[in-house]
Image (tube, coloured by chain):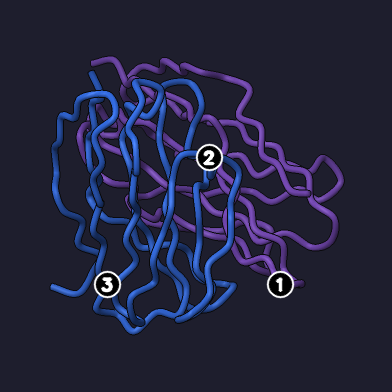
Chain colours: A purple, B blue
Amino acid sequence: AQSVAQPEDQVNVAEGNPLTVKCTYSVSGNPYLFWYVQYPNRGLQFLLKYITGDNLVKGSYGFEAEFNKSQTSFHLKKPSALVSDSALYFCAVRISSGSARQLTFGSGTQLTVLP
Amino acid sequence: NAGVTQTPKFQVLKTGQSMTLQCAQDMNHNSMYWYRQDPGMGLRLIYYSASEGTTDKGEVPNGYNVSRLNKREFSLRLESAAPSQTSVYFCASSEERTDGYTFGSGTRLTVV
């Protein structure tokens, strides 16, 4: 079985400050990890993914995420938050082998960047 | 533009009515998925199709059926709608295991 936990329903940060959205995962085997963003009344948009290699992954809109195998975490980060980053963020995991290809999503974290 | 197209965007049903949500992708992806999104619960997988001609149950399949009509199209059917099926439904597709999903824009369904 595979699962993802996003421990914070809501994260508030001031514009210009660094932001972190937390994600931990549980899989049997090696994980493929993803972050998506959802703006109001829109579908989910891909931000970045970790497949293998460098533990620091860079993605769209200046976001990055750090894969930590020992802590089974994949936290999303941005050095300087913008008001336009305010949205709902989802972490997702997929196992790297076997027949199952579906992603399992976390419950989402609402990020609000305050001007 | 290439992507995933869902219809309709909005729908209101009465309890007991049936309807089919349509999804089509033009990226030649093998795998397609139906998820529902409910507040505080993230996205939950209803059904998926790993390839044309195959379908499998996900986490919350009860009350739904699916059809993988061809490689492009994957429809979701509610035979007898219930208020508990009020949700936002998303279709998605992907190719390789290392790929993320491409999502449609969603169908907002209300069952009264």
Q: Residue at x 36, y 26 (%)?
A: B82
Residue for badge 3:
B25
Residue A93 in the image, given as x and y percentages of width and height: 63, 52
- What kind of residue is marked 3? Gln
Chain of the residue where label 2 is placed in the rendered structure = B
Residue B85 vs residue B55: left or right?
Answer: left
Q: CA distance from mark 3 to mark 1?
A: 22 Å
Mark 2 vs mark 1, foreground winner is 2
Chain of the residue where label 3 is placed in the rendered structure = B
Residue for badge 1:
A99
Q: CA distance from mark 2 to mark 3?
A: 25 Å
Q: Residue at x 23, y 69 (%)?
A: B3
| In the foreground, B38 or A6 | B38
Chain of the residue where label 1 is placed in the rendered structure = A
**Secondary element at image label 3:** strand
Residue for badge 2:
B62
**Secondary element at image label 2:** loop
